[in-house]
Image (cartoon, coloured by chain):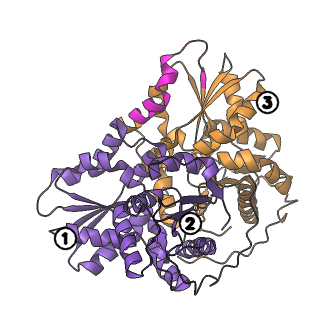
Chain colours: A orange, B purple
Amino acid sequence: MSRAAPTRASAHRASGVSPRPDLPLGVFDSGVGGLTVLRAIHRLLPGEAAIYLGDTARVPYGTKSGESVVRYALQAADLLVERGIKLLVVACNTASAVALDALREHLHPLPVLGVIEPGASAAVAASSNGHFLVLATEATVHRRAYTQALHRLRGDAVVEELACSLFVALAEEGWTDGAIADTVAETYLGGARLHPSGTRPDCAILGCTHFPLLLTPIRRAIGEQIAIVDSATTTAEAVRAALDEAALACTRRHAGELHFMATDGTERFARVGTAFLGKPITAAQVELVDV
Amino acid sequence: MSRAAPTRASAHRASGVSPRPDLPLGVFDSGVGGLTVLRAIHRLLPGEAAIYLGDTARVPYGTKSGESVVRYALQAADLLVERGIKLLVVACNTASAVALDALREHLHPLPVLGVIEPGASAAVAASSNGHFLVLATEATVHRRAYTQALHRLRGDAVVEELACSLFVALAEEGWTDGAIADTVAETYLGGARLHPSGTRPDCAILGCTHFPLLLTPIRRAIGEQIAIVDSATTTAEAVRAALDEAALACTRRHAGELHFMATDGTERFARVGTAFLGKPITAAQVELVDV
């Protein structure tokens, strides 16, 4: 599979683009995980077309420097804007934490949504006692972006962030149910269930786009008394609100088309991504791109 | 933590360096996994000093294009040669599969060893029936480098390569023993044990630098009748042979000093790397470098 040499200029090319309702949504992630966000959007807004870009050549972003992540995100945004989009969803926790301001400035007046703020808002609405458990990757936990977002919304929030790295590997391997997933979830989360008193979290945020695939074992391990907020679903609701607010909702009456782009490994993107999207993707549907 | 801007030229700068016995060994990997190779070298050759470089900013290499991996490997080699080394160990399966020829040409006359050839040689020596089971990451399996190396050594070799992606996550999480590790190993490998007939592999190669940490659950799952070849140990033996052959073995009588460099995340390198090296590494011992 050949790939063209990168030719796009990197700085400020996208500024001043005016979004139109008939354009697709743009969804960007470092890999396949953001397909759970696309899935939630597609379920809530089935008439909206979308272009998804997974930067699989440079995944994971979590271990990269903030400067690199901002640069990667701007490059990805430029490519999506070049294709024509009306709103950008940053379906990547690291890029949401690090690059959202830069993207908003770069793409103005195009609306830009991340996954952290919608998840934090929904969690604050779901919690009574203001104690939150954030389940995320090691890099997201290290960055404390959910803690900061929760504190902005509720000053007295008590936040425990818990790295559940193996959930990512389980999701990518497709081992999302069964004995191994249950045991891993129990190992990470059993403690949260054993103490369901007032001093324990009453709301857990799935702070990684991979984790909605593990919802069943997570629910089993965490018990029924803790609300689970899935930032994919809450981001989809934020997309609907943003489209309504900006009068950008698609008015055509047909099923939204989905287009996929990846910066490497289109075969793997299709194979692993199928489970994340919840519907089949073939390698032929995935366009190999440079950013 | 600050980092200097990269200033080194990329092409052919290192050529013509003459190695000397008093210099340290250079060990290069995409991340922390190669520390199992360094551990094996340090155990076999305790008088040899070594400099280890983990390209943690760009890990994993397995999903990158071959051209990128060659470029990264040459950059890493340049940095190590600049510090002064007498032999380079490429302790990364992807770089060993893709970049060894380019590195040998670039660094001549410095000896360059990968991890695949020593592992394949040891496996051919250990097998009676010529049937091999290679346990590796998805990317290594996809590349079939062990199959090619085994066929070069034994034309009638029958090779089954098996991606065991979760082993990497388990090793990095430190869950290398116990119920989860056993269940994961059993899920991947139980089939190999259930049919120990002549038509089944009699030798398994640990084709990922992370997997020696999982030796106990792998052995339990695979049974006692299959030999396990650890490419870390076999690479250490190849290093000793290469040093002897080139008259480069260190003749000073003191314990070899180890120096660590990483391209990102020195704290994580130290924390996770400690288990891989089998002795403590502190963040202060890990130098942050650009390549």
For the view shown, which residue lies furthest in the front direction?
B253
Kind of residue indicated by mark 3: Arg
Task: Using the rendered image of the protein, determine whether residue B29 is visible from the camera's viewpoint.
Answer: no
For the view shown, which residue lies furthest in the left direction?
B198
Alpha-carbon distance for marks 3 and 1?
A: 63 Å
Does the magenta segment cover residue B263? no
Q: Position of residue A123 (x, y in %)?
A: 67, 27
Q: From the viewer's perspective, is residue A128 above or below residue A280?
A: above
Task: Using the rendered image of the protein, determine whether residue B103 is visible from the camera's viewpoint.
Answer: yes
Q: Earlier in the sequence, mark 3 or mark 2?
A: 3
Q: From the viewer's perspective, is residue B208 above or below residue A133?
A: below
Which residue is located at x 34 percent, y 37 percent? B178
Alpha-carbon distance for marks 2 and 1?
A: 35 Å
Q: Position of residue A230 (x, y in %)?
A: 60, 34
Q: Which numbered circle lies on residue A282?
A: none
- Mark 1 belongs to which subunit? B
The residue to which callout 3 is attached is: A152
Does the magenta segment cover residue A199? yes
- Mark 3 belongs to which subunit? A
The residue to which callout 2 is attached is: A264
Q: Which numbered circle lies on residue B130?
A: 1
